[in-house]
Image (cartoon, rainbow, N blue to C red):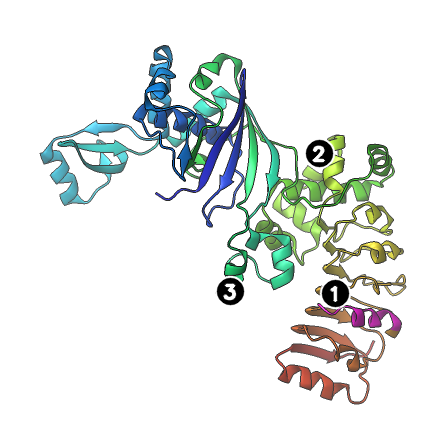
């Protein structure tokens, strides 16, 4: 089995273990933060030491040799450690040659009614291995692991699943040209840092663990394969998956900002913080991009969760993380004034559809924006000044005048443009936008010569859908 991650033991103090987890396989995307994964780390190190898999190579290194490794395994803990290891791996049962041949003939992967993970011969003895006891192992993990915390996240998720890559290439995950992969292949692997707190009565689990042990692993989250087990312990996050170089405001400013928010704005912030702490970007895009956020949040989670989140106090660390968010999905929250987002200087993605907005002046200050949805659906719209948003790639907005529409002239990277105009379209406005891929819109009329301009854009490969509709 190919390695998915690598583990590096950073520190061990009493019943607390800090581990750096690095993703080393392109198909692995998740932050594994369950107690069963934490217990696997501890037991896998025990197994490597027990079997003498102590190598100093590219895929592993240890601060001791094989002889010292055996000395670190306390004999008083062997029985319980081996029982846990057997539940994590599989129970190997010796069988006769006749039994083995019968299993081969029937082509079944069961033995005495129990599912098998493998069968074969080792050292002249035929055997079967029972399937991993996923439910039982997860129960043991819940008993022995008190808490799992995610302390920090770096370069996560993979470069091709990051917000920036989607904004630059318009693609999520697979589907890039080889030259794009080649350009990014030397970028650092995604890494996250776990703090594992052991139940004080289970500290025997850490007796063999030494700092600076490093090895690659195929460990995965057993919750995908449990049948009846329901996890009750939730991980604790101390960081967003998408950090930025933005320096947070002072703590006093953050506290005053949060205290002064309306209930609707607190719902927006809490919902986004929850979404971004618990999902990788491709899932966020799939579930919330282009959707009415409020309705979608209640549909995916529950109608009660937002109320529960409002009752959950945010720490200063939470507020610092929030101030560095790159995405804000805020469709359908009944917002009227966007002034509160002045503090979110690092925003790259902002969705505001279906809000009765009356003041959107602050958007002009969000100079890092690359994707904006600002469809208001109101007859009396506020002034929309987007002239400073020169990094914009994907824009949906309904300007009230030609002056507001002309903001796109200063957006050389503009790739997709969706709009609803209440005035005549002068298509010459698209002439200098050489990166356009798609235009969708409507207007009550179109200026003479504009149809020809749109047709020329189609000939250049731009997807154009423009309707003439009387308002």
For discs 2 and 3, the disc positioned in front in the rendered view: 3
Which badge, 2 or 3, comes first in the chain's sequence? 3
Q: CA distance from mark 2 to mark 1?
A: 32 Å
Residue named by callout 3:
179
SS state under label 3 = helix
Q: Which mark is residue 396?
A: 1
Q: Are marks 1 and 3 in contact (CB under 8 Å)?
A: no
Q: Main secondary structure of the magenta part?
A: helix
**Residue 379 visible from this viewpoint:** yes
Which badge, 1 or 3, comes first in the chain's sequence? 3
Q: Which mark is residue 146?
A: none
Residue named by callout 2:
308
Asked if the stretch drawn in magenta spans residue 333, the answer is no
Bounds of the magenta span? 403-413
Q: CA distance from mark 1 to mark 3?
A: 30 Å
Q: How many marks?
A: 3
Q: CA distance from mark 2 to mark 3?
A: 47 Å
SS state under label 1 = strand
Name the side, left or right, on which 144 lies relative to 316: left
User: Which quadrant of the figure contains the N terminus?
Assistant: top left
Q: Nearer the viewer, residue 376 or 76?
A: 76
Q: Is residue 316 above or below residue 443?
A: above
């Amino acid at each position: 089995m190919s390695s998915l991650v690598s583990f590096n033991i950073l520190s061990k103090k009493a019943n607390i273990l800090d581990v750096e987890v690095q993703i080393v396989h392109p198909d692995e995307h998740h932050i594994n933060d369950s107690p069963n994964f934490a217990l696997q780390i501890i037991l896998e190190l025990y197994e490597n030491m027990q079997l003498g898999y102590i190598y100093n190579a590219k895929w592993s290194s240890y601060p001791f040799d094989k002889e010292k490794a055996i000395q670190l395994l306390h004999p008083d803990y062997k029985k319980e450690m081996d029982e846990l290891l057997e539940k994590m791996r599989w129970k190997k049962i010796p069988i006769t040659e006749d039994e083995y041949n019968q299993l081969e003939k029937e082509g079944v992967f069961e033995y005495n009614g129990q599912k098998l993970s493998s069968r074969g011969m080792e050292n002249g003895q035929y055997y079967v291995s029972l399937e991993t006891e996923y439910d039982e192992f997860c129960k043991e993990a819940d008993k022995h692991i008190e808490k799992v915390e995610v302390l920090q996240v770096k370069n996560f998720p993979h470069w091709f699943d990051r917000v920036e890559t989607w904004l630059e290439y318009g693609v999520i995950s697979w589907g890039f040209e080889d030259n794009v992969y080649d350009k990014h292949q030397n970028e650092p692997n995604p890494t996250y840092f776990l703090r594992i707190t052991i139940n004080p009565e289970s500290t025997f689990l850490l007796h063999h663990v030494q700092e600076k042990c490093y090895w690659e692993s195929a460990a995965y989250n057993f919750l995908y394969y449990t049948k009846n087990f329901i996890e009750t312990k939730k991980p604790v996050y101390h960081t967003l998956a998408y950090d930025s170089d933005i320096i947070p405001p002072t703590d006093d400013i953050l506290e005053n900002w949060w205290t002064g928010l309306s209930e609707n704005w607190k719902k927006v912030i809490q919902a986004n913080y929850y979404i971004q702490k618990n999902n990788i970007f491709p899932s966020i895009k799939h579930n919330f991009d282009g959707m009415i956020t409020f309705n979608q949040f209640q549909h995916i989670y529950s109608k009660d969760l937002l109320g529960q989140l409002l009752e959950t106090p945010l720490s200063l660390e939470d507020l610092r993380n929030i101030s560095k968010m790159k995405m804000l999905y805020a469709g359908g929250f009944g917002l009227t004034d966007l002034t509160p987002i002045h503090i979110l200087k690092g925003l790259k993605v902002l969705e505001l559809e279906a809000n009765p907005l009356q003041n959107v002046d602050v958007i002009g200050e969000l100079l890092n924006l690359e994707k904006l949805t600002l469809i208001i659906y109101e007859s009396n719209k506020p002034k929309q000044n987007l002239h400073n948003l020169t990094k914009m790639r994907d824009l949906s907005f309904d300007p009230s005048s030609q002056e507001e529409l002309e903001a796109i002239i200063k957006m050389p990277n503009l790739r997709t443009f969706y709009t609803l105009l209440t005035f005549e379209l002068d298509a010459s406005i698209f002439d200098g936008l050489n990166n356009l891929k798609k235009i969708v819109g409507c207007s009550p009329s179109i200026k003479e010569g504009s149809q020809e301009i749109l047709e020329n854009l189609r000939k250049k490969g731009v997807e154009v859908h423009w309707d003439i509709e009387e308002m």
